[in-house]
Image: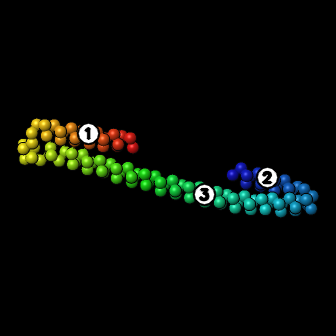
Amino acid sequence: SIARMFMATKLVEAKRFTPELSKEAQTKLKAFQSDLETHTKRLNELKKATAERKKAVTVREAEHEVKKAEELGKAVAEAAKALMDDEKLTQLSSEEIRAASEATIKAEQAASNHLTET
């Protein structure tokens, strides 16, 4: 990173000082480098933990959406149940068939809208 390159440059510059100042500057710069490495490790740990939490949230959201889609699919199947059995269909009045058809269309539209939104 830029901070590491800056520290390395300053260490090289510190070697040009008088021996007494050079030693003191190098000692402080090495301490700063150590602190920088510690903070860099901590930052990487935080980034990793954040990525893992974000992934877990995304998975939970996806599971929720799949469950909702499955429920809506079951609702469509339930609404269309009366229309799928030919024997029962012949026994229904035209009003009952129309009502079942409308219920099926509404359930299908709700499922379709949900899938489009997600």
How packed is label 2: few (under 14 Cα within 10 Å), some, or many (20 or more)?
A: few
How packed is label 3: few (under 14 Cα within 10 Å), some, or many (20 or more)?
A: few
Q: Position of residue 47 (x, y in %)?
A: 59, 55
Q: Nearer the viewer, residue 87 or 7?
A: 87
Q: Position of residue 93 (x, y in %)?
A: 9, 39
Indicate which label's residue lies in the foreground, 2 or 1.
Answer: 1
Q: What residue lies at 65% left-to-right and 60% top-to-bottom?
A: 41
Disc nearer the start of the sequence (2/1): 2
Q: Are marks 1 and 3 in contact (CB under 8 Å)?
A: no
Which residue is identified by label 1?
Answer: 106
- Element under label 2? helix
**Quadrant housing the C terminus:** top left
Q: The residue under label 1 is which amino acid type?
A: Lys
Q: The residue under label 3 is which amino acid type?
A: Leu
Q: What residue lies at 34% left-to-right and 53% top-to-bottom?
A: 67
The Cα–Cα distance between marks 3 and 2, rounded to whole angstroms, is 28 Å
Q: What residue lies at 93% left-to-right and 58% top-to-bottom?
A: 18
The Cα–Cα distance between marks 2 and 1, rounded to whole angstroms, is 70 Å
- Element under label 3? helix
Q: Are marks 3 and 2 in contact (CB under 8 Å)?
A: no
